[in-house]
């Protein structure tokens, strides 16, 4: 009964944040009466029973015990084609760190940038956006490529509101690692992909959180993930971007516009003290997204089935067989 009561409180709190997110999204996006409101994706972030050794591998017992997010979709949502390659993530926390693990399916793992705080999305990358109190301002961004080169920045307000990124902002104590399932920067073989593991210190995230950090039981933070993927070609045995082609932007929770800097559209990460269970929040679309989201939490929280391994040919949920890798 105690767990049920705590989970009910979590549902009610998440409902309130989602309703607030509705108002923020209305402010954050142009009014489009032809498109119904779509609730953001949600994830219950469980406490890890022990600190994680950050080596880029997601085979640790703590990671295996918690579910994946949904596979990423196009940044604009279901109106666009499904991504060519699968991406998914997990989250954990303890008293010192907010942990994020991600798996990126990629037949050609390549990267070129080695200088910290360069514009990492000029390579294929994985990106994290965190707005601790969901006020649509004062949020963090971190980008990383397959060489484990990072770019951390802080935004007092979104670009569309006249904001600019503070590139000099750093995350002291940040831990990151990348593991390659294949051969980095080798055009002679087919890779399976890469995984990234990150530990964000709460003391760094506390700088502009304006709320208790680390979070309290049932607190929700606005979080989203993005993957930038460029079309490439091979020239004299080396990878390079195809000139004139725009990047693909794949995300966990759709932004509904090609712009990650709409914090009101970020997903929801609900912090939970328990180290047990696999309760996933399956967000629903439609005009009653918030109510459906709370209903899912209260009545039909489910254990996610085992997901296919990186690079497998198992079908994606609702998208048919995974397309075969085509070299080059």
Image (cartoon, rainbow, N blue to C red):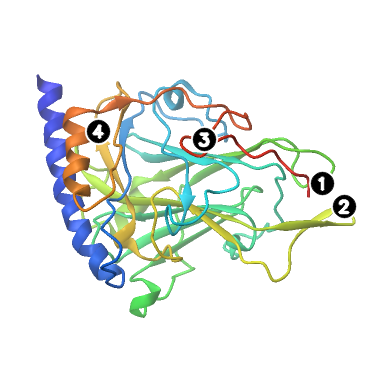
Reply above or below: 276 against 175: above
Reply above or below: 78 against 293: below
Q: Position of residue 85 (x, y in %)?
A: 59, 44
Q: Position of residue 320 (x, y in %)?
A: 54, 36
Circles 1 and 4, Cβ within 8 Å, touching? The answer is no
Residue named by callout 2: 237
> Which mark's residue is nearer the viewer, 3 or 1?
3
Q: Is residue 192 left or right of residue 219?
A: right
**Of helix, strand and loop, which one carries label 2?**
loop
Residue at 41% in and 29% down: 51
Alpha-carbon distance for marks 1 and 2?
6 Å
Residue at 30% in and 50% down: 40
Residue at 70% in and 45% down: 109
Circles 1 and 2, Cβ within 8 Å, touching? The answer is yes
Q: Which circle's residue, 1 or 2, is located before the other in the chain?
A: 1
Per the rendering, the mark at residue 272 is 4
Per the rendering, the mark at residue 311 is none
Residue named by callout 1: 187
Q: Is residue 306 left or right of residue 26?
A: right
Q: Which circle's residue, 2 or 4, is located before the other in the chain?
A: 2
Residue named by callout 3: 316
The total of numbered circles placed on residues is 4
Circles 2 and 4, Cβ within 8 Å, touching? The answer is no
The quadrant of the image that shows the N terminus is: top left
**Of helix, strand and loop, which one carries label 1?**
loop
Reply above or below: 41 against 51: below
**Of helix, strand and loop, which one carries label 3?**
loop
Q: Which circle's residue, 3 or 2, is located before the other in the chain?
A: 2
Q: Is residue 11 left or right of residue 80?
A: left
């Amino acid at each position: 009964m105690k767990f049920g009561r705590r989970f009910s409180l979590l549902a009610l709190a998440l409902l309130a944040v989602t309703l607030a997110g509705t108002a923020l999204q209305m402010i954050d996006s142009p009014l489009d009466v032809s498109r119904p409101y779509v609730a953001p994706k949600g994830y219950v972030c469980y406490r890890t029973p022990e600190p994680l050794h950050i080596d880029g591998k997601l085979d640790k017992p703590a990671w295996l015990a918690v579910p994946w997010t949904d596979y990423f979709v196009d940044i604009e949502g279901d109106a666009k084609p499904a991504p060519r390659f699968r991406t998914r993530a997990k989250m954990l926390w303890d008293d010192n760190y907010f942990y994020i693990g991600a798996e990126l399916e990629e037949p050609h793992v390549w990267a070129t940038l080695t200088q910290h705080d360069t514009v990492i999305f000029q390579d294929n990358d994985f990106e994290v956006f965190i707005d601790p109190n969901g006020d649509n301002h004062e949020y963090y961004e971190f980008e990383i490529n397959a060489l484990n080169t990072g770019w951390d920045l802080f935004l007092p307000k979104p670009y569309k509101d006249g904001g600019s990124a503070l590139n000099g902002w750093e995350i002291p104590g940040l831990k990151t690692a990348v593991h390659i399932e294949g051969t980095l920067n080798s055009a002679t073989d087919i890779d399976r992909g890469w995984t990234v593991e990150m530990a964000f210190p709460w003391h760094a995230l506390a700088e502009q959180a304006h709320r208790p950090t680390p979070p309290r039981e049932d607190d929700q933070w606005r979080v989203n993930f993005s993957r930038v993927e460029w079309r490439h070609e091979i020239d004299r045995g080396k990878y390079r971007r195809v000139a004139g082609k725009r990047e693909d932007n794949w995300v966990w929770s759709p932004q509904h516009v090609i712009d990650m800097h709409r914090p009101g559209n970020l997903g929801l990460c609900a912090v939970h003290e328990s180290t047990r269970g696999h309760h996933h929040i399956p967000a629903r679309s439609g005009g009653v997204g918030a109510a459906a989201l709370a209903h899912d939490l209260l009545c039909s929280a489910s254990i996610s089935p085992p997901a296919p391994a990186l690079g497998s040919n198992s079908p994606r949920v609702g998208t048919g067989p995974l397309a075969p890798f085509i070299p080059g």
